[in-house]
Structure formats: C-alpha cells, structure tokens
Amino acid sequence: MCILFLTDTMCRMLNVCRHQPNARLLRLSIITVTLIILTHSWTSMVSDGIMGSIFNLAEHTVVCISIAFYDMFSKLVALGVALVASRQARGAYNNACNNNVVAYWGQNSFGAVDSNQAGWQKPISYYCQDDSVDVLPIAFVNQFFGTGGLPALNLANTCNPTDQGVFPGTGLANCQFLASEISACQAKGKLVTLSLGGAGGAYGFQSDAEGVAFANTVWNLFLGGSSSTRPFGSAVLDGVDLDIEAGTGTGYTAFVNQLRSKFTGASKKYYVTAAPQCVYPDSALGSVLNTAFFDAVYVQFYNNPCGLQTYGNVANWNYGNWDYWARNISPNKNVKIYIGAPAAQKAAGSGYVDAATLQKISLETRSNFPSFGGVMFWDASQAYNNNRFDKAVKSFLGSTCGTTFNYPACDAPSWTASGQYPAGSKASYVWQAKWYASGAPANDASGTWVPVKACGGATTQPPTTTTTTTSQPITTPPVTTPTTTTSVPPTTTPPTSGSCAGLAAWSSGIAYTGGSVVTYGGHRWTAKWWNQAETPGGASGAWTDNGTCTASRLFRFYYQEDSHAIAALSLNPKELQAHLAEKLGILSWDPGRIGPELAGQVVFVGIYDGHGGPSVSQFLQRELHGLFESVQPELVPDAISWMKSQGGYFKRFKGGALERWAERGAKSLTFGLEARSTLAFLEADKRISEIPESEKCGATSSVVLLHSLEAPASPFFSSRLLSLTVAHCGDTRVLLCTTEGGSAYPLTETHHADSRGEAARLRRLGAGLVTDSFGEARWMGALANTRGLGDFRYKAFGVTPEPEITSRLLTGEEYAFAVLVSDGVTSTLSDAEIVDVARGAADPQKAAKAIVSLAEELGSEDNATALVIPLAGWGKTTGIDKTLELRNYRKKTMIGSERQRRT
C-alpha cells in the first residue's frame, strides 16, 4: 500500500476536500495510516502537532483530513490496535456471521403511508453511511417478461419508468444514475442485491426453459454480464433475492441453477437469497427452497399468523421449523435464516414489535438455533424514520461476527415410542407440544410438535451437516388439552344460545388457540385447545358448541363498518331529461306525461364499506343521499378549489366531470346525474375532512339511482322502463342478474391500483404501487382502494372521491334483480355465485341473507353486506344454477377465496 502525505494546500489543489463521500471512508483512511506508521516504526513522525492529509489509493477514494497524533507512542499503539480491529470487524460482508442486518430499499414504504416528504426514501447510498446495514436488496423487479422481452423495474420516488424514462423499445426504467450510489455502498463492504417479485406483479415462469432464459437476462442486465440496456449502468450487483409471493415454484430452481453456473469462475462472489412467508412450507417457494442452493433466507415474520407478535406461543411461532429445514432439508446445510421484521408500526399490517422486544426475540433465537443469520426488515425508509430502527438492531446484534454455535445439552427427556429411544450423538432438538400429542415429533407445520431449540445430547456438539430428532419435548402442554385421549366426546351439557355479533366466521386456514370463539353453521363455537382445519362439530371434538347465534350478523345483511341507505329523492325532471339524452341517447322522454313530482322521483340505494373505523361509512349513511338532492352547480368552483388544496396529484385538478360547470357561462348548462353524483361525492368528502378520524379511516361507496320513464308502478321496481345510474367509488360492487340464463352482469370496476383503469389514471404516480404479503395491490403500500372517501393522509397521492358513473336503460323483464355487495362478499364469492345464491331465494330479503351467510360459511374475513333490488323480471330467471356444484364442494371442503388461500 502506498500512502502519500500531502499538505492542506496540495489537497485543495487536487479539489478533493469536498469529495469525502461519508464519515466511514474517513475512518478507514485513519485506520490505514495508523497501521502503516506502526508497521514501519515511523516514530519520528509521531510528534505533537504533526498535521497531514491522506490520499488513500487502496480505497480508490480521495479524502482530505487532518490528524492530530498522540504525543505518547503508547496511546498511538492502543489507538492503532483498536482501529485495526474495528476495520477487520466491519470489512467485507461475511455470510457466515450471525449479526448481519438486511434492509430492503426501493419502494419508499414510509412515503406510502406518510405525506411528509422529508421522510421519504433517499438515494441508496444514504443508508450506507454507517455500519448499521450489511445488505440492501433493491426492490423490485416485478415483471419478468415485459415490453421488448425485458423485465420491468420501479423504484418508487427514486427511479421509475415515468420520471426517468425507459430504454427504447422496452418498459425497463433507465436508472443508470444509480451506478455511483450502488458502488459507494459496495465500497463499504455492503452487499447490494436485486430483489425479484414482491407480493404482486406480472412475474413467474411457465417452464424451466423460461427460468433459464430469465437467469441469462438478469446476469446480463444486473450482474456480471453485459448489455446496452443495463438499468444500473456499470454497477455490478452482488446477487439476487427471490421475494416470490404469488404463483408456483415452476422454473425457479432452473433459474437459480443457471445463475449459479454463471457464478462459477466469476471475479467476485455472488449470493442468492429468498424471502418466504413464515408459514412453513412457503406456498410459492417451498419446493424451490428444497431443491435449489440458497445462501440466506429472510423469513417474513409479519402479516402472518406466525408473526413476531406470536413469539412465545409455540402453537404459532415457528422459527424452529425453519432451522430444522436449514440443517436437514436445504441443499445448503449452512444456509442462514433471518428474522424478517417490519421496521415501523406502519410498515406492515401486523408483526411489528419495538426494538427492545425484537432484541429479546433475536438474541434468544440466536442462542437457540445455529442457522440464525441476523435480522431483515422492511424497509430502509421506515427504519430511518423510526428513531433509526436499523441502528438499534445492529447495536443489539453486536459488532462481533459469530460464526460458531455452542450446542447446549438437551434438557428435556427423549421421546420414546416403546419406552426407549437412544439419543444420537449429532445435533438434536428440544421439541415442545403445541397441544396434546402422542406421535413422534416431525418438522410438520400442521403437526403436534415444534422445535424450540437445538441441542447436542449430553455434551456440546460441533455443527454437523445432518441432524437427528431424538431429543424430545417438554412434557407439559402449553394449552389446556385432553389428558388421556386425543378424541373428546361431545359435551353432555345442552348448548345455550349466545350473541355472535362481531365474531369472525370459522376458517380452515386460521390456527386457533384455546378459548378462541367463532361462528359456524349458525352456531357460536369455542376452541378447547389449539387447532387448525378442525371443523366445529367434527370428530376431533376440538370445539365446544355454545348454541345458536342470537341477534348475530348471520341473520342480518350488514354489520360493523359496513352501512347502507335507501331513500327517495326528488330531483329536477329537466336534469333527468338531460341525463337521458346525453348518456342513453333518449331524446323523446317527456316528463310532463307523468307530472313533475313523479317524473323527478329517484330511488337511491347506497352501500358503504368502511375501513379503519366506522366514522366515514356512518357519515355517508346519514348524509350522502341528502347531498345528492341538495347540491347545486354554484358549488362546483368551491369543490374544485378544495380538491386542489389537497396538493400532490390534485394540484392541477380541473374538475373531472364537473369541469364544464367551472367555466364561464356554465349557468346556462343543465346539471345531469353524472355531474350531480360527482359533486355530491366531493362535497361529502369535504365535510368528512372535518371528522378527526378521517385522516386514517375512510369508506368506499356504490350508489344505485333508479327512476321510471313511465308512470311509476307500485312497487316502483315493477316498471318495465327504468333508467339505472351507478355512482361507484372503491371496491364495493353492483351486479345485474339477467332473466335469460341468470347470468351476472357487473356494473362496477374494482378501483384498486392494479386495475387497468386506475393504473392508467395513476400512471404518473405509479411508484406508489406495492403489494402486500397476501398478493394484494396496495397503493402507497397501505390502501387497497385508489378511489374512496376519507383517507386524507393519502389524498395527495391520487386517492380520489370522484365516482365512476355508469348508466343503463332497463327495458321489459330483461333483468331479474340488482345486487350491491361489499368486499366482504366479493373476496369470497364470485359474481356468478352471488347471483346464483340470490336467484334461488324466495324473496329479496332472504336472497340478501343467503349471500352473506354463504360468504361467512366459506370464511369471509371482512364485514359482509348484501342488498338485493328486485326488478321487473324478479322470479322469472331461466337456466340452471351454474355454481351449485361448486358451492357445495366449497362448503364441504371449506375452500375459501383465492385471497384467503394465499394466507
């Protein structure tokens, strides 16, 4: 190594004093010069007052500093030793250590839930300024085969296809300005990898051949290959992370194997990691983890029933299953398992624990399991805004790289099937019963045992590449269980009725602890002990029947945060006439034929699905129909100004459907239902802003407006000529059922960030789209809906109260009924199932109840509401019930929705 001592003047001439990337390079330079002075015994230079500057060729970085050397050589020696030790500890990344910290970067998670731009995601080098983080996966490549056959990359506010542009003929963002950022992090010994997938996106393989081809693409675009379309320019990333949360494992093993073939003989070390859900085995990557070689696995212990919030509950917390997998099943028996954690309360739906709690969990896990590699968290922006959560994590993990594990003696008796079962000499486990158990322990997530720590028989054992499972559980079950048999006869005490209000329906996909209360089959049930997929009333006897539900939501068609309203409005017939002419092309309707009062009568039916609390949905229930009747064109300019005041997306808001009424001369225009509906929604949102809770809560809404074009019959819905208008905002849903064939005809589109229409509307803010652990699109990382009322913390990001308007003329008996449902129904039932259930009911009230009851029976996890509006064709549908066989099968096997199966 060559060290040149320059004067301050010479340093300034080189113009390097301002080229000091960060404090850590400064520290490394001091370490280097101190070591060389000691090695060469340049004691003559070590005198009081000597000042100098360093040109550090070894780090390829020019740094200008001044060093005041100690006047005592002994102090200098001590300083030199300490700094050299520090440099060795903080050097290049070591995958064998058990104190590594991984922070995902790229999706601006903080910005997704907080409008304070000061805390939004910074350039990646910002998070490399100290030793808190060792690995930064860049998230995400969320499309594998996009335009031009290349993948798609979106790094939120840092680099996205809209703001930074794409390579010609592709959809791949050009982020080459990040090359120096990435290199700066790598120069500090940190890994910068590429994360593929996320909880949603257009990714996956149809075959192994696709996996191999994509591996070649990734190698050329991001790793050691070459291409004219490298998103990060000359920067060479350190590996690939698979955060695959959807689809199957097809092609991924071939992908990993092909990458590793590229790694052979490469000039640098590359890594392959994965980020499965904690539920074992992972539904998407389970088979891949068993067949491909991974260096580390970042298990997501959040947004799951095995999350960090369950630590200490052996029925849920399952790190031991992952350690067992690592040392017994994984092709790499030295693979490291990380605890994945949210970096802040708002970084995930569940699983966040504070730094002190995470310290306890991490250190206890590290002492119990040899595979422990460190902590991963989502994400860097959240960590920095949560009192430097990353720094706290690194602090309690320590600076010492622990690469060995001291196996404690197994302090529990060995399990015996016939009185004897000799302990093996290799590493074993202490297993604990989740509930009553008699069979042999096995690494089965649905079994009765879970490994709670590794042990080495009677003596400390070194790590081995294979393990046995001879060391067995603590004999005291963690929950109240039967003591002599695994089958419990039904109780002889007659069940009593009880309220089921607010109780969730039983689901086969949820693990229940003793004392859990659910509804099933119209009854209230209490779990006797931990169980999963044990049907209430089934042979296992895992549930106590508390009797039939009374006053429960099973016998209503709405509850909790959901609400609805039905009203008769009196509108200006001229408005209705203008609407018919503009939207339906009906120019001949004369309201005078039936009189102005009847001609202006409009039936209003609204459904509101609240989230984050009931305040907004309850406001809509009370006020929205009145606003539909009272708003006037004069309010349009004020409504537009108020929307502009929300900033961000709305700074240039022109009014949408109201734009014509904001212009000069607008007074001569006749309001139509589209304009009236839009203004009513905007005015409602303005008033909702005065509700304190509306910053964090909101509601979606679907409103159906019906008015007869002939003399209204009694009841109104028997009219054979109806104008139907839907004002829709969010993911509530409106369907028509055709009389002929009984088919479902949707009138609304789900307003989620990944829907075609909303994606087009929000394309300039596309960086805000992320997906959660269940595979659902989340706008700004939090909201499912991109249209809704309330949710004011997200307004600036394009969450709009503007309704989407649909109009249709209903003639004769072509439709049997309309149905409005909340997403507590549609998350579980298809459109066809909804209309088939309703068409088989004797009357509309029973139809609505039947829809909600089926959704509950199949495990709906959300508030469920259904409103059925009979039309002229009620009771006259033809054709067969097309989903009857499917519904019966689902009820028999308890197959829930696709979303529920992902959990």
Image (cartoon, rainbow, N blue to C red):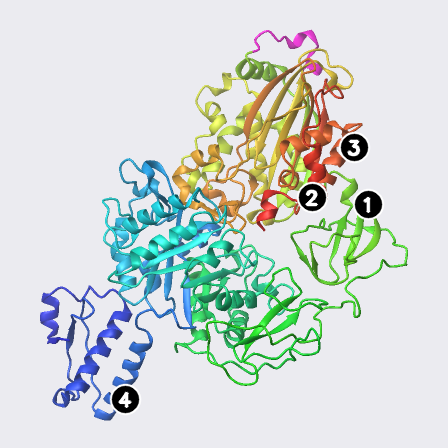
Q: Which residues are magenta?
A: 586-600
| Measured Cα–Cα span from mark 1 to mark 4 | 77 Å
Q: Are marks 1 and 3 in contact (CB under 8 Å)?
A: no
Q: Which one is closest to the eye, mark 2 or mark 3?
A: 2
Q: Are marks 1 and 4 in contact (CB under 8 Å)?
A: no
| Measured Cα–Cα span from mark 4 to mark 2 | 69 Å
Question: Alpha-carbon neighbours of circle 4 within 10 Å: few (<14), some, or many (≥20)?
Answer: few
Residue 622: name its quadrant: top right
Of marks 2 and 1, which one's residue comes earlier in the chain?
1
Residue at (29, 63) in percent of width and height: 186
Residue 604 percent location from the top left of the image: 68, 27
Can residue 723 be seen here? The reply is: yes
Is 427 displayed left or right of 625 in the figure?
left
Residue at (55, 73) in percent of width and height: 468
Position of 17 relative to 586 (above/below): below
Q: Which one is closest to the eye, mark 3 or mark 4?
A: 3
Question: Alpha-carbon neighbours of circle 3 within 10 Å: few (<14), some, or many (≥20)?
Answer: some
Is 272 displayed left or right of 729 in the figure?
left
Which residue was labeled with disc 4? Answer: 78
Residue type, mark 1 in image: Ala
